Amino acid sequence: MLVENRRLNKKEIIIVGSRDVAGTFEKEHKEVIRAIEGQKDANGKTKHIGLIEQLQQGGELHLENYFILSEYIGENGRKYKEYLMTRDGFTLLAMGFTGEKAMRFKLAYIKQFNAMEELLKGKLIEREKGIAVRQSLTKAIQQSKENERMHGHAYSTYSNCIYKVLFGMNAKQLREKYGIETKENLRDYFSEEELKAVQSMECLVSGLIDCGWSYDMIKEFIEKNNSRCLVA
């Protein structure tokens, strides 16, 4: 039973996979797919109306708010279809599952969705806080001579130093780890705890810059005094 936070089309959403639901409710995956897509007979006539068609008939234009077509690699190396479901998609699907045992599973999924939504809210709050922290660090750098000495690359240099201390990797290495391009915001992939740690370190660095410390002095200080190394 796995409800998780995924980044799809540059947006973070909370989803559960159709295979996971099938396994939990002790159904074959093809049954869950059939419930979502519907079923046609040999002549192409609708034998069973699926949830997607029902949504379309109801005038829903954004099916991705419910079901997102995806795929997975089977044990034989072949690609197979699956669906990622949002909370609303899961709710529609689970309506068709009845019985005492099914009800326990539904409640367990709902609790997981609630927990993940709270985590996502916390992360979004930290991202908002981070804007002010980065502005403060940027201002401190601009008012110092470090940016000029580093030919305009002081912010990225300090950021790499902070990432190296906290994660053991610089920005480039972290991007490679997460499989993201340079134009994507690396911090969108950090957890709430990681964002807090980065912002705390940026506040410290900003204060040290304001006190006139050089980059080398700050680097040595945070490397020696940081006791919170995160595993990215």
Image: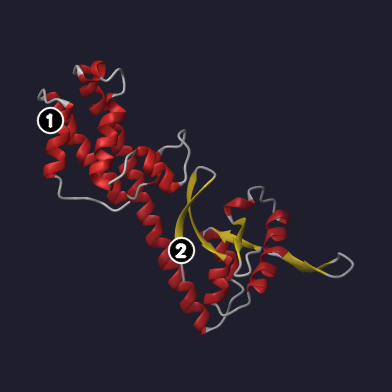
Establish if 17 lies above or below 154.
below
How far from the left and from the top, in percent, is residue 205? Answer: 18, 33
- Label 2's element? strand
Q: CA distance from mark 1 to mark 2?
A: 44 Å
Which residue is identified by label 2? Answer: 3
Which residue is identified by label 1? Answer: 217
Q: Which mark is residue 89?
A: none
Mark 2 crowd level (few <14, some 14–19, many ≥20, 10 Å Cα): many
User: Could you tell me which residue is drawn at 11 percent across and 44 percent down?
Assistant: 225
Establish if 173 lies above or below 111.
above
The residue lying toward the viewer, choosing from 121 and 28, is: 28
Q: Who comes first in sequence, dot 1 or dot 2?
A: 2
- Asked whether disc 1 touches disc 2, contact meaning CB atoms under 8 Å apart, the reply is no
Marks 1 and 2: which is nearer the front? 1
The residue lying toward the viewer, choosing from 204 and 165, is: 165
Q: Residue furthest right?
A: 43
- The amino acid beneath tag 1 is Met
- Label 1's element? helix
Establish if 65 lies above or below 29.
above
User: Could you tell me which residue is drawn at 16 percent across and 29 percent down?
Assistant: 216
89 left or right of 222 in image: right
Looking at the rendering, which quadrant does residue 40 occupy? bottom right
